[in-house]
Amino acid sequence: MKKWPVCAVALLLLAPLYAISLYNYILFHSVVELFSIIIAGGIFMVAWNSRHYIENQYLLFVGIAYLFISILDLVHTFTFQGMTLMPGYDANVSTQLWIAARYLESLTLLIAPMTFHRQTNGGFYILGYSAVTLLLIVSILHWRIFPDCFFENAGGLTPFKKISEYLISAILLASGTLLIVYRNRFDTKVLLWILLSIIITILSELAFTNYAGAYDFSNLIGHYLKFLSFILIYKAVIETGLTKPF
């Protein structure tokens, strides 16, 4: 059977996702977020199980990071407006978790190229990301000291949230630039998939700078773009890691 181009498959998947969003936006949000969480978990499994064979630390560092990014995304999903799994939290908390996860993701991609020449035990990365993730979750859910990101009845997005999205986009742009600098360390196709994923993630972040409610159209577009970016990450890391492990 002839393989469909990944972009065509991704675009075909957008139609049923849109239909789901019309039927139940919470279900749409959960599907997109759980898809990205599964991909992130897959990246970790590929990276962790190949750690003894890879020559540089980039994949291991990114793989471990995505495990903890997925944890933040999972809590974000559970606290999303309309969900009843974690009652007592409003849209502000869900948005704070989103920003925390995106900061962690963008900074990881920025720092990752600097690990090419390092040989560090994966346990060190796990310990570090565990501490950071726990601190972020506690600061949002328990201490309530993380900066506010969304006021449902008082203007919507806060200046901190909007500025954060632009800052995250800038960090992602810098990380893409570093990848181009280190392009000789990547398979050409893998580099292309990662760069495209970063570009789409930047567009996703920009879409999240302009919405007044959790169910707004720009929020829908932002999640569409996140869905596409994780398909590209899947192509770059999981598919390539399984079909061309060396």
Image (tube, rainbow, N blue to C red):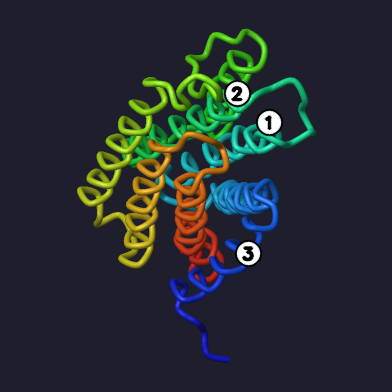
Q: Residue at x 30, y 65 (%)?
A: 188
Nearer to the camera, 106 or 123: 106
Question: Where is residue 142 drawn, in percent x and y?
Answer: 67, 11
**Mark 1 and mark 2 residues within 8 Å of each other at the beta carbon:** yes
**Mark 1 and mark 3 residues within 8 Å of each other at the beta carbon:** no
Q: Quadrant of the N terminus?
A: bottom right
Looking at the image, residue 67 sits to the left or right of residue 26; the answer is left
Residue that badge 1 annotates: 79
Question: Where is residue 56 drawn, in percent x and y?
Answer: 40, 46
Nearer to the camera, 234 or 217: 217
Classed neighbour count for the residue bearing mark 2: other residues with Cα under 10 Å, few (<14), some (14–19), many (≥20)? many
Residue that badge 2 annotates: 93
Compared with 31, 215 (above or below) is above
Residue 141 occupies which quadrant of the picture?
Answer: top right
Q: Amino acid at mark 3?
A: Ala
Residue that badge 3 annotates: 19
Label 2, secondary structure: give it: helix
Q: Earlier in the sequence, mark 1 or mark 3?
A: 3
Question: Where is residue 100 drawn, in percent x and y?
Answer: 50, 27
Residues at marks 2 and 3, CA–CA distance in whole angstroms:
27 Å
Q: Amino acid at mark 1?
A: Thr
Label 1, secondary structure: give it: loop
Looking at the image, residue 55 sits to the left or right of residue 238; the answer is left
